[in-house]
Amino acid sequence: MYTRPLDDLCAPVTPAEGQDSAALSAPGPAEIIRTDGLTKTYTARGPAITAVDHLALSVRAGEIFGLLGPNGAGKTTTVGMLTTRVVPTSGRALVGGVDVVADPSLAKQVIGVVPQSNTLDRELTVWQNLYFHGRYFGLGAEEATEAADRLLEQFRLSDRAKANVATLSGGMAQRLMVARAIMHRPRILFLDEPTAGLDPQSRIALWDILGDLHAAGQTVLLTTHYMEEADRLCDRVAIMDHGRILALDTPAGLKRSLGADTIVRVGSVGDLRRLAAVLAAMEGTRSAHVTEGGVLLYLSGPVARTLPRIFAAAEAHGFAVTDLSVTEPTLEAVFITLTGKELRD
């Protein structure tokens, strides 16, 4: 268990010597990340592309905050700006009270970052990757040694301490990158699609570790396109597409916004818009949305009585039902309602 005190995690940032305190215009007491009009437009090649469009976010200290959306939604660019790797075109971002554009060096001291790609030093052992990261951030030799040993134990990597990182599995490498990112005790941990490409067992192991960090008070901002991940880990989720926030709430609140007890996917071919209109007229249907290869129905009330009526209504209008599935409301259903497309497109 990660046992760093919550008071330490949420302590105010002290301006470095010579630092203008105005550059640290602090957010509210419970707010640790704030963006105002944050925008990134790429213009180097061809027509201008706006990856992030006037983003306004507020992340509270101690929460796991998720950016959920498909590839190309602007999640990674957002994290890039918040972690000083991408310079905003306009707008402002504060992390831990530090303006990331005005003072990127100070901002880097209060954040830990786990990018999508493996950035471990392949010339070093597992233990050395932690030790030298700690020394780089100002830890003394004894403190860095103790921290490296403790983190290897916590992240279940002690038996690989002397191994070269090239020999690690994908799940082990990802756990090591998270351990390295918190080595210097950052106030905010950024995770960019942390479980992409991991097998289910490694994904669950990383979820457990993030749960421990959260319980200890660590603020985490993660990006993901896995609905289950956002639902399981996040206190609040912002659904994002085309650089904009479409909805923001707790996972439960987002799902409640659908106003449905059950979601039924009706597979069929032909004019799916007409099929959606037919099924939307049925009793108990809250809404109907065309999706790839079928129609999503959001239903209220007992579903058992509705299923026969779905078949009857579809066949009466010349549609053959090719498949049918029943689920509870999901974050993907929220996204489809907002955008009309599958979350993983």
Image (cartoon, rainbow, N blue to C red):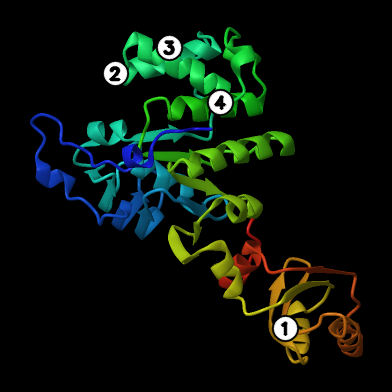
Q: Position of residue 33 (x, y in %)?
A: 33, 50
Residue type, label 3: Thr
Which tag, 4 or 2, sits closer to the chain's start? 2
Residue type, label 1: Ser
Q: Position of residue 330 (x, y in %)?
A: 66, 64
Q: Are marks 1 and 2 in contact (CB under 8 Å)?
A: no
Residue type, label 4: Gln
Query: Residue 293 appears in which quarter of the rendering?
Result: bottom right
Which tag, 4 or 1, sits closer to the chain's start? 4
Q: Position of residue 256 (x, y in %)?
A: 60, 73
Query: Along the line of sight, which residue is nearer the eye, 120 or 262?
Result: 262
Which tag, 1 or 3, sits closer to the chain's start? 3
Q: Which residue is mark 3?
A: 145
Which secondary structure, mark 1? loop
Which dot, 3 or 2, sits closer to the camera?
3
Q: Are marks 4 and 3 in contact (CB under 8 Å)?
A: no
Which secondary structure, mark 4? helix
